[in-house]
Amino acid sequence: MKKKTKISLILLIMIIVILLYLTAFCSLHAFETEANQSQELFRQKIQEFIEFSKIPIKLIDIEFDRTTNIENIGIIVENIIDRTHFIRMNGDVHKADFIPLQKLYIRKEYPQEYKEYKNFIFNLLDYGDIILRVKWNFFEEFVTLAISGKNTNLKYEPLMYLYAMEVDVSNNPHHKLIIRNGFRIPVIKAELFIDIEPDDGRHIETYNHGIKLKAAPLWKAKSMEKSLIYVSNGIECVNSEAEIIWASALPKFKIDLKKFSIELGEGFPGSSGENTLYLRKCSDLQ
């Protein structure tokens, strides 16, 4: 009886070991599948980015680096920051002058931006995210780190994040600006506004005007806005105009109030550009 019990116990242990092995094997297989899917999806997204942006850049390879956990997440954040590169571009998005690759040196010279960028990356990361090494060639070879979340959700890659892929300005009225990066995520939003309190439908009693401006981490925008009241067909109207300059990475701006102009100053801008917004409102609220 004891012998049978011993044999049964051994068989039970063997079954448990086999089940644990199969579970581990299946988990590993599922993880490898997810990692491969992340690499393939990211490869497709990068190719779309390269074709659409017209940047003379090549993708060399994408490799699995590691997964995030409670012990390495802080190191991963710093590694992503250390491997942040950007391409300096000015002018029209599709007719740009490309300046050789820039690397983000941010810790000592730009402590506020470093803190903001660090918090941004940290908040993007979840335990179990896949970190990918992306190898590029833009007149030289370099590596950035990308983040792929659960269900192969592509979260971040610095080169694409800091590149202005689309610049959209609304028509009729020409008062809203949205800039999207290489992930097609809005990184700059601007909206010109005029609030009017009409007196009798022909005259303006009071009015308020300005511009709402939002920028994502490592993107900056500055604006100047002016307005004037004029009369059209006996009805008072307000015309408002705003000049906006924007850039990614670490730009600095020069503002000249007398000339009503803003331009890039010393600094390390990535993508950059300028836009003008217009808006008109009249006392009859037309």
Image: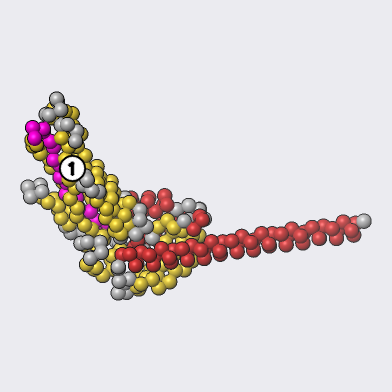
Picture layout, residue 19 above or below residue 189: below
Dot 1: few (<14), some (14–19), or many (≥20) neighbours within 10 Å? many
- Horizontal and vertical percent for residue 188? 28, 50
Q: Quadrant of residue 53?
A: bottom left
Residue found at x 68% / y 62%: 22
Extent of the magenta region:
233-252
Picture layout, residue 271 above or below residue 237: below
Whether residue 233 is visible: yes
In the figure, is residue 228 to the left or right of 209?
Answer: left
Residue found at x 11% / y 32%: 235
Picture layout, residue 225 above or below residue 150: above
Quarter of the image with the C terminus is: top left
Name the one closer to the observer, 51 or 42: 51
Residue found at x 21% / y 44%: 173
- Horizontal and vertical percent for residue 86? 30, 63
Q: How many marks?
A: 1
Residue found at x 22% / y 61%: 92
Name the one closer to the observer, 203 or 60: 203
- Amino acid marked by disc 1: Leu
In the figure, is residue 89 to the left or right of 35?
Answer: left
Name the one closer to the observer, 77 or 240: 240
**Secondary structure character of the magenta stretch overall:** strand
- Horizontal and vertical percent for residue 30? 59, 61
Whether residue 69 is visible: no
Residue beneath disc 1 = 279
